[in-house]
């Protein structure tokens, strides 16, 4: 059986256990144990009904754990081995799991871990490997997160904004080890689109759709973003024939439907910018004027210094490096990548000496190895131009 | 046996060969250097000797406790004259000799003109966990 199909069952199985009276934390633990059991047993003995198998095994694990806990405390506790069937969980149960796991009281790293486990159906070991921490550390992070949200009611609408933020963070982590977190984030966001639509009687939520469109449009460019030896290839130099046109078409369609609802938000605006890049057959044909307009929209929504910085790049492309530098003057210089943007604009303005020095400064402030290497290479390239 | 190969931005013995900082190389020389480091790590994964590698930014500070109820004291950014770690690689190899051999290869990464940079690397044995057979 395909492990991703197995993963899709996890939130529903947690929902069944919670409906039967288990608390979220114990239900989630029991389902995790059942999941690990399934990964061992199913290759040799595939079950006829995978979901029923998981429910049975998870419920037994839950009963065992509850009994062990009760006897440890010296108390009698009646737990039915075979519980009443009860109503079948509906899609709102899964939606509530999204809200619970991304609860605003959780730190982002904890919300990410809990979401990947309880909603994404990944094992603690897989999540630990993807985030390069020991399995025991990740297990602790998850159980602390569960303690923090223990006692929160499962039946209240949650904060959709934090759910989207968590999925955005998962996507941003990209491909790590054996696990494709970007693909996992897309899967979970697709599911969230369906769940929010069902919950709202068919109406789609524009920002959920906007985030999905944004992810698809970025995923479409993924293969062209890295060159030999893992080197970073900037947008203008990417081989556009390697962009995934299927993902672009889907992303643009989802975005257009969302924009038609006329409730603009930051993810739709970011997706619109990504769509304009995807639309350009060559870098030179990019519609930078429209991109600047979208950055202006985005600034009205978020007023984020990072958006202001990216806007300066777009202004530089639309109206020339002088205008870009003027736009940059309105940005606080302590924003990450400020030096890299200034270096780029100075180079285009013909100030090569200053550009080279700024690329060196930017490479020292880089937050990833590919980015650092890219900026060092840019510094070397500009210095080379100065010499020759 | 595990060893730490420490790479320094500055500090250590006097450089065997003085070479310009990387941003003054040609882009091709930069690429060749980065590729060499990549290939080295990939090869050690292939031989089962690679454990971990990590690069560090030159930013940061020294930090210490400053008494009950007081915020920690920081000393930074790092002075230009001080030793500064750039990153590390952890290897798990048969012997000290093998660790030295590998450090020597890593230090031969190409620089300007494709010549080795003869960079000093610090090689440090790990203290192992206590053995189960105690006598």
Image: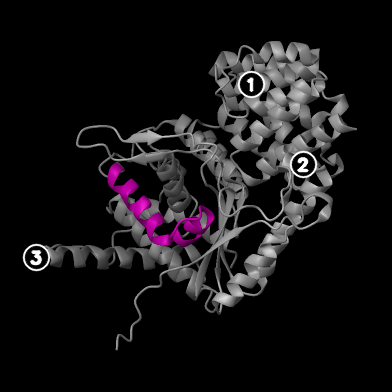
In the image, residue A57 lies at what x, y percent?
Answer: 38, 68
**Of residues A105 and A45, which is closer to you in this image?**
A105
Residue under circle 3? A74
The residue stretch that appears in magenta: A124-148
Front tag of 2 and 3: 2
Q: Is residue A244 visible?
A: yes
In the image, residue B119 lies at what x, y percent?
Answer: 66, 56
Q: Residue furthest bottom?
A: B135
Residue under circle 1? A309
Q: Is residue A245 magenta?
A: no
Q: Which mark is residue A233?
A: 2
CA gap between label 2 and label 3 equals 63 Å
Q: Chain of mark 1?
A: A
CA gap between label 1 and label 2 equals 20 Å
Quadrant where the C terminus of chain A sits is top right
Q: Residue at x 72, y 43 (%)?
A: B22
Task: Tell me which secondary structure the magenta stretch mostly adopts.
Answer: helix
């Amino acid at each position: 059986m395909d492990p991703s199909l197995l993963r899709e069952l996890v939130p529903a199985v947690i929902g069944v256990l919670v409906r039967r009276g288990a608390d979220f934390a114990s239900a989630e633990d029991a389902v995790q144990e059942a999941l690990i059991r399934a990964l061992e047993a199913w290759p040799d003995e595939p079950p006829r009904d995978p979901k029923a198998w998981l429910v049975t095994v998870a419920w037994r694990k839950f009963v065992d754990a509850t009994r062990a806990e009760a006897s440890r405390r010296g108390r009698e506790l009646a737990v039915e081995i075979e519980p009443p069937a009860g109503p079948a969980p509906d899609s709102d149960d899964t939606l509530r799991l999204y809200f619970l796991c991304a609860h605003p009281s959780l730190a982002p790293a904890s919300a990410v871990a809990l979401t990947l486990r309880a909603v994404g159906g990944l094992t603690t070991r897989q999540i630990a490997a993807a985030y390069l921490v020991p399995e025991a550390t990740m297990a602790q992070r998850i159980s602390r997160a569960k303690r923090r949200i223990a006692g929160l009611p499962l039946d209240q609408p949650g904060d959709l904004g934090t759910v989207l933020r968590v999925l955005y963070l998962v996507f941003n982590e990209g491909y790590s080890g054996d696990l494709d977190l970007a693909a996992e984030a897309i899967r979970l966001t697709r599911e969230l689109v369906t769940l929010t639509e069902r919950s709202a009687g068919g109406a789609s939520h524009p920002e959920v759709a906007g985030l999905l469109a944004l992810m698809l449009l970025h995923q479409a460019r993924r293969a062209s973003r890295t060159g030999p030896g893992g080197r970073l290839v900037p947008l203008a130099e990417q081989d556009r024939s390697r962009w995934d046109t299927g993902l672009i078409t889907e992303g643009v369609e989802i975005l257009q439907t969302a924009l038609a609802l006329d409730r603009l938000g930051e993810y739709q605006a970011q997706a619109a910018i990504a769509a304009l890049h995807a639309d350009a057959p060559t870098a030179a044909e990019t519609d930078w004027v429209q991109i600047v307009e979208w950055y202006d929209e985005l600034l009205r929504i978020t007023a984020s210094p990072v958006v202001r910085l990216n806007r300066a790049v777009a202004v530089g492309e639309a109206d020339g490096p002088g205008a870009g530098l003027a736009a940059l003057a309105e940005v606080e210089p302590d924003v990450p990548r400020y030096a890299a943007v200034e270096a780029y604009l100075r180079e285009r303005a013909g100030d090569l000496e200053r550009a080279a020095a700024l690329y060196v400064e930017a490479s020292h402030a880089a937050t990833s190895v590919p980015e650092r290497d890219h900026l060092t290479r840019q510094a070397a390239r500009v210095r080379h131009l100065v010499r020759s | 046996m595990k060893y730490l190969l420490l790479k320094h931005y500055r500090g250590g013995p006097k450089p065997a060969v003085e070479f310009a900082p990387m941003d003054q190389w040609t882009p091709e020389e930069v690429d060749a250097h980065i590729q060499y480091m990549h290939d080295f790590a990939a090869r050690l994964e292939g031989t089962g000797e690679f454990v971990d590698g990590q690069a560090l930014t030159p930013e940061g500070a020294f930090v210490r406790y400053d008494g009950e109820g007081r915020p920690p004291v920081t000393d930074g950014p790092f002075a230009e004259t001080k030793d500064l770690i750039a990153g590390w690689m952890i290897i798990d190899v048969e012997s000290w000799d093998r660790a030295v051999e590998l450090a020597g290869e890593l230090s031969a990464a190409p620089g300007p003109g494709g010549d080795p940079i003869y960079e000093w690397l610090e090689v440090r044995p790990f203290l192992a966990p206590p053995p189960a057979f105690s006598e």
